[in-house]
Image: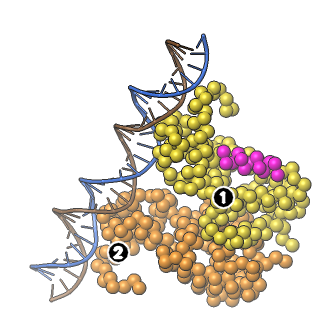
Chain colours: A yellow, B orange, C brown, D blue
Amino acid sequence: MTDTKPLRADAARNRARILDVADAVFAERGTSASTEEIAKAAGVGIGTVFRHFPTKEALLEAVFTAHLRRLAEQAEALSEAKDPGEAFFGFFALIVEQSGAKRAFANALTDAGVDVGRAHAEGAAGLGEALALLLRRAQEAGAVRDDIGLPELMAVLIGASLGAEQAGADPLVRARALGVVMDGLRPRR
Amino acid sequence: MTDTKPLRADAARNRARILDVADAVFAERGTSASTEEIAKAAGVGIGTVFRHFPTKEALLEAVFTAHLRRLAEQAEALSEAKDPGEAFFGFFALIVEQSGAKRAFANALTDAGVDVGRAHAEGAAGLGEALALLLRRAQEAGAVRDDIGLPELMAVLIGASLGAEQAGADPLVRARALGVVMDGLRPRR
DNA sequence: CTAGATTCGGACTGACCACTCCGTTTGTCA
DNA sequence: TGACAAACGGAGTGGTCAGTCCGAATCTAG
C-alpha cells in the first residue's frame, strides 16, 4: 500500500526530518505555522517540503496520521494487559496527558474523530479498532459502564483532550478534571 | 464604565448590526473569516467595521464578551431556582448544547477559561462568579461532588463543549457523552 | 569516474487579508 | 433649514503565505 517507491537516500532522510520538525513546530506554534518556517527549521528549502508533501494540508495529515498510528500501537500493546480496567484508564490518561502538552496531538485526535470511517486518515481506523477492543474488555471486566460505545468514547476522549490542552497549566486542576471524566465512565453503582 | 459616548443614531445601529452579523459569520465560517466578509454581510463598508472595532481581535473579543455576558445572565437567573442540582446540570447541558452548535460559542468559552482572572474579557469574571454560585449550591445540596472547585468545573465544561462541537452531528451520541461527563460530576456513591 | 536522472534551494507569483486614508454622505442642533 | 461635526464607503497599501519553476547540486548505476 505504501510501496513502489525506491526513494533516493537523501530524499528519504529529508522526508523523515521534515515530518519530525513539522510535528514539533505545529505543536508549539499551532497549525498555522508557515511552511517556510518549517522548511527553515528542518534546514531545507521550501521547494523540498512541497515536493514531499504537495500541499500544506497533506503535511498536516501526514503528521497527524503518524501520531494516530503511534497511539494505536500503544493501545494495542496495552490490550494484552492483565487488568482490562487499568489498561483502559491508563490509556485514556495517557492520551489526554499527551494532548494536554501538544496542540498537534489534540488536533490529530480531532481529525480522528472526524474521520473515523472516512478514507482520509488511515491511522484513525487503527486507533478506533484498538480503542474499541480496550473498551470492550474493560466493559466485560465491569470496569467501564456498558451503555456507551466507541462513538461516545471518542467524543469524551476528544473533549477531555481539548479541555486539558487549554485548562490552564496547573497539573493539579488537570488531574482532577480528568478524574471527573474517568469517574463518569465507570459503572454507576 | 462604558459611558462618555453619545453615539450617533446610525453609528449605534451599525455597531449593533456588525456585532450580530460577526457572531453569525464567525460561528459558521470560523474565526478566520475575513473582516471584509463580515462587512459585506452586515451591509456596511470595511472602514465602518474598523472604526467600531479598531482591530479584528477587538471584534472577536467583543463578540465573545457578549456571549459570555449572556451566559452569565442565564446562570444568574438559574441560581435562584428551587432545585440547585437541577439548576446546575441544566445550565451545564445548556452551555454544552449551545457550544456544540456554534463554534464561536466554544471559542468564547475557551477565552473565558484562559482569561478568568485576567483583565482581557470582563465578561468572563461574571460567568465565573455565576458558575461558582451554581456550583456551591449544588454541592451544598449534595447533587455535585464536593472535591472539585471552579477551575476544575471550567476545565470539564470547556472540554465537554469542545468535544460536543465536533463529536459528529449525531445528537444521540452527543447526549450520551454529555451524560457521562455529568455523571462524573455527581458524588461517588 | 562519468553520465544521466533525481532531488535540492529559494526567488518568484498570485491570492488574500488586516488595516489606512480621504472624498462623500448623513445626522444633529440651533 | 443650514452648517458643521460625525460617520460612512471602499480603493489602496503593505505584508504574509501557499504553491511554482528552473538552474545548481547530489546521488547512483554502470
Count of marks placed on residues = 2
Q: Specify the segment rendered in magenta.
A: A66-78
Residue plotted at (49% across, 75% down):
B121
Q: Determine the chain carrying the residue at label 1.
A: A
Q: Considering depth in this image, is B88 or B155 the residue closer to the camera?
A: B155
Work out which quarter of the rendered image holds the C terminus of chain A and state it: bottom right
Q: Which quadrant of the structure image shows residue B33?
A: bottom left
Q: Is residue A75 magenta?
A: yes
Give percent across and percent down for residue A183: 79, 69
Residue plotted at (50% across, 53% down):
A32
Q: Is residue B1 magenta?
A: no
Q: Considering depth in this image, is A28 or B100 the residue closer to the camera?
A: A28
Work out which quarter of the rendered image holds the N terminus of chain A and state it: top right
| Residue neighbourhood size for the residue with mark 1, other residues' Cα within 10 Å, grouped as few (<14), some (14–19), many (≥20) | many
As displayed, is residue A126 above or below residue A52? below
Q: Secondary structure at mark 1?
A: helix
Q: Which residue is mark 2?
A: B13
Give percent across and percent down for residue B149: 68, 79
Q: Considering depth in this image, is B108 or B152 the residue closer to the camera?
A: B152
Q: Determine the chain carrying the residue at label 2.
A: B
As displayed, is residue B110 above or below residue D6? above
Q: Secondary structure at mark 2?
A: helix
Task: Name the mark on residue A99.
Answer: 1
Residues at marks 2 and 1 touching, judged by CB atoms closer than 8 Å:
no
Disc 2 residue type (three-letter): Arg
Give percent across and percent down for residue B167: 65, 59
